[in-house]
Amino acid sequence: MRIGIACYPTFGGSGVVATELGHELARRGHEVHFVTYAVPSRLNVFAERVSYHEVAVPTYPLFTYPPYDLALATRIVDVALHEGLDVVHAHYALPHAISAHLAREMLLPRRLGVVTTLHGTDVTIVGQDRSYLPITRFGIERSDAVTAVSQYLRKVTEEVFTPRQEIEVVPNFVDPERWRPVAGGREGCYAHAGSRLLLHVSNFRPVKRVLDVVEVFDRVRKRVPCCLLMVGDGPDRPAAEELCRRKGIAAHAHFVGNTPAVETIVPAADLYLLPSDSESFGLSALEAQACGIPVLGYRAGGLPEVVVDGETGFLREVGDVDGLAEAAVGVLLDDQRYAVVAEASRERATRLFTAEEMVSRYVAIYERVLAALPEPPAEP
């Protein structure tokens, strides 16, 4: 099967999931073609059966805002014609589902399946904006199949958009060989001898509540020797750095920016902090758990589907910084309990969220979509 993937090539979850899915599909013998404006952060362009097609957006004085959605649709058409695409998998509703639908219309009578995966903010924030709600609904309804990464996200989508077709839940997945505990993995990761390492990875947007990460760390370090490692970048990074300076903990909090090799850092942590307002799923939490790292976060969105409170991590209500700090201190000071939670984290992550299971579901969806498409008219 020849599959086109349209996604955002950033460090965000939707682009990461799309890239990992592409690699897994290629390993199973499918041809995968990424169509986007830059090389996705985790894409291995040298992998067999994986290709990258850049979307060039022309700039003209007439265009105050370059029309990326139109350029993307045009590039999808070009790739479909020359590479023989069977399906386009759009990750994130806007603009990818719209561009994929437009490309299919341009290709008629040639067949092209369109599958859309909803990842979170495309539904919970962007899609609910009055300016985008109608076209987001249109993109969902014109897709041949729609998936969501969690039960929570499916429920929100059905409540907000009331789409006509069924939305299938296909959770994110993790490679247990790539994301695993590593003995001695802490070396070079900022943790001093005898101290614990707390980790946060995100795009530092307001929804991630990175100031809460700092507040939790500040409370924990007063009772447990520890350091904080902040991986990623975004609009709230300066405020988080300033808060560390004001609290006098800047020497213990390290901001390292974006890195494509997160799997080399995560195993070094003792706890992973993800106190978001809402997570559609929480891919970084799953990756941490696969490394045997307990996760602390807020009981919001789809995160409770990934983290089991008291078993693989600890969940508190949004804003309960003191509660998260108490949970962190409690498990860090109890070696036996920590070992139990860490082992349960790894076991559940690698049992319920396997690439084998989720990729097989996606392939079944592609096959179902292709089987339902009308046959093109016979050549005259």
Image (cartoon, rainbow, N blue to C red):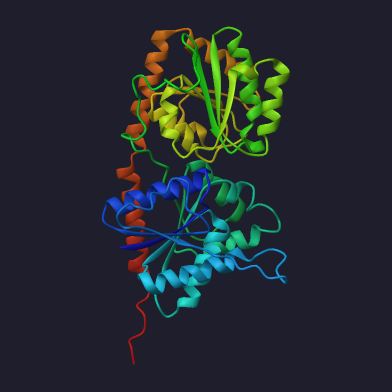
Residue at the far bottom in the pictured view? 380
Provide residue 95's location: percent of width, then percent of height.
Answer: 57, 60
Q: Quadrant of the N terminus?
A: bottom left
Q: In the picture shown, does residue 170 fall above or below 97?
A: above
Provide residue 213's location: percent of width, then percent of height.
Answer: 61, 24
Q: Quadrant of the C terminus?
A: bottom left
Provide residue 102's location: percent of width, then percent of height.
Answer: 53, 71
Provide residue 240's location: percent of width, then percent of height.
Answer: 67, 28
Q: In the picture shown, does residue 151 fall above or below 145?
A: above
Judging depth in this view, the residue of 297 and 270 nearest the camera is 270
- Is residue 169 in view from this perspective? no
Judging depth in this view, the residue of 270 and 172 nearest the camera is 270
Instruction: Determine whether, in the image, residue 237 is placed left or right of residue 79.
Output: right
Q: Residue at x 45, y 34 (%)?
A: 262
Q: In the picture shown, does residue 372 fall above or below 127?
A: below
Judging depth in this view, the residue of 123 and 33 nearest the camera is 33
Quadrant of the rendered image containing residue 42:
top left
Instruction: Determine whether, in the image, residue 47 is placed left or right of residue 60.
Output: left
Judging depth in this view, the residue of 91 and 222 nearest the camera is 222
Q: Residue at x 62, y 36 (%)?
A: 204
Instruction: Determine whether, in the image, residue 74 is placed left or right of residue 172.
Output: right
Residue at the far front in the pictured view? 188
